[in-house]
Structure formats: C-alpha cells, structure tokens
Amino acid sequence: FTHTPPSEIPLRLVGSEMCIRDSGHADRHIRWAARVAVEHQPVTEWQDEALAEKDPQAALTALCALARHGDKALQGKLIAALDRLDWAKLDLGQKAELLRVYQLAFIRMGQPDAKIAAAVEKKLDAVYPAPVPALNYELSTLLVYLESPNAASKTLALMSQSSDQTKHNWSPELLARNAGYARAFAATAASSPQRDQICLLYTSPSPRDVEESSMPASA
C-alpha cells in the first residue's frame, strides 16, 4: 500500500461539474475540497458555471474560487453574481463568506470602477451595522474601502455604543482551586479591553475622513 500525498493527487480527474455541485455541500470540509479541486482546473472550463450557479452556498464557494483565480476582466460579472444573493436569506456563516468574496474580488482583481463600487456600497450600507460584531468588522472594512459617505458616522456610532463583550465564563469550582489566581482572573475579566472598539478603530476611516463626514453638506 502506497500513500499518495494530497498535493500529488491528479485533481484534473475530478470534473468541474461535480466540484461545483459539491461546493454547496453542508459539510464545510467537503466544500473546501471541492473548491481546491476546481481551482486546479483551467478557469475557462468552470467560470461560466460558477457565475450562473443559483444555490447560495454553492455560488459562494465557486465565486470564491473565481475571485482567487479568475481574470480581472471577470470582476464585473463576479460582483453581479454576488449582488444577486439575498442578504436576508443567508445564514450568518454565508453572510461572512459573501463579505469575504467581495474582499477577494477587490484584492485579487483590483479596484472596481465607479459604477460597481457604488452598487456594492449601496447594498452593504443598507445592512450596516449588523447585529453581529463579526459582520460589522468586515462591513466596516469594505465600506471604508469603497469610500462610503456613511462609513465614518456609522462606525463611530458603533464604537460609542459598544459595551463589549463576552466575558470569560469561569466556573466557580475552577476558580475555587486557587484563590490567588482566581482574583487575578476576576480582575482581568472586570477590566477586559473593548475588543469591538479596537477592531472597529482598526478598520475606521482616517481622522480627516471622519472630520469631512461630519461637515454640513454646504461646507
């Protein structure tokens, strides 16, 4: 019996149709394998299928692959395919994936033209802020990149409202094992840093952008 390392498996033997189909599998590990397999095939053989995919999960996985390996000329079609996905019907994980694929499309394919940027900004601004901090980090990053006129004011509002945070849920039995360490943990938990604010500050606009966003329209 001879073991063949995964990197040496001839992924071209796996048809792109099967890969795209498995891109919507409920198991994320299978989705990952499907994406890797399709990425090892010529983009021209599966790009149209990826762009036309209607299943939200399969589309997200396939479009992620396309953002990573597709030609820059496909950016408009890729963004249009992402825009067809209904934010309200996506679960939390899919929303995070959608934001990540938008980011990849801009990182790998370059800055979008004004029309594309405006369309994406309009869609994302409508759902920012989200009720989940993890989504707000990514939304803030994208909206600042797209130069959204509302990014600064909305992000500052979030930072002022953030009360943070999930505290460590240490059990009384665990803390009772050592009174000295328990006091240190309790003190740390009581003064934990505002993680939401730190993340939003990292993605927030420059001070000049914040100042300009707060000026009257006639200024």
Image: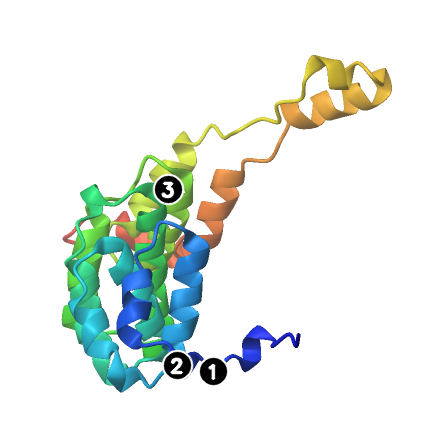
> Is residue 63 visible from the viewing direction of this image?
no
Residue 18: give x, y in percent of width and height: 30, 69
Residue 189: give x, y in percent of width and height: 65, 26
Q: Which residue is mark 3?
A: 156
Disc nearest the viewer among 2 and 3: 2
Residue neighbourhood size for the residue with mark 1, other residues' Cα within 10 Å, grouped as few (<14), some (14–19), many (≥20):
few
Q: In the visual, does 61 lie left or right of 125?
A: right
- The one of 69 and 3 positioned closer to us in this rendering: 3
Q: Amino acid at mark 2?
A: Leu
- The one of 100 and 121 positioned closer to us in this rendering: 100
The residue located at (44%, 65%) in the rendering is 33
Secondary structure state at the residue bearing disc 3: helix
The residue located at (74%, 14%) in the rendering is 173
Secondary structure state at the residue bearing disc 2: helix
Residue 65 higher or lower than 93, as above or below:
below
Residue 72: give x, y in percent of width and height: 28, 83
Residue 125 higher or lower than 34, as above or below:
above
Q: Which residue is mark 2?
A: 13
**Disc 2 from disc 1: Cα separation:** 6 Å
Q: Which residue is mark 1?
A: 10
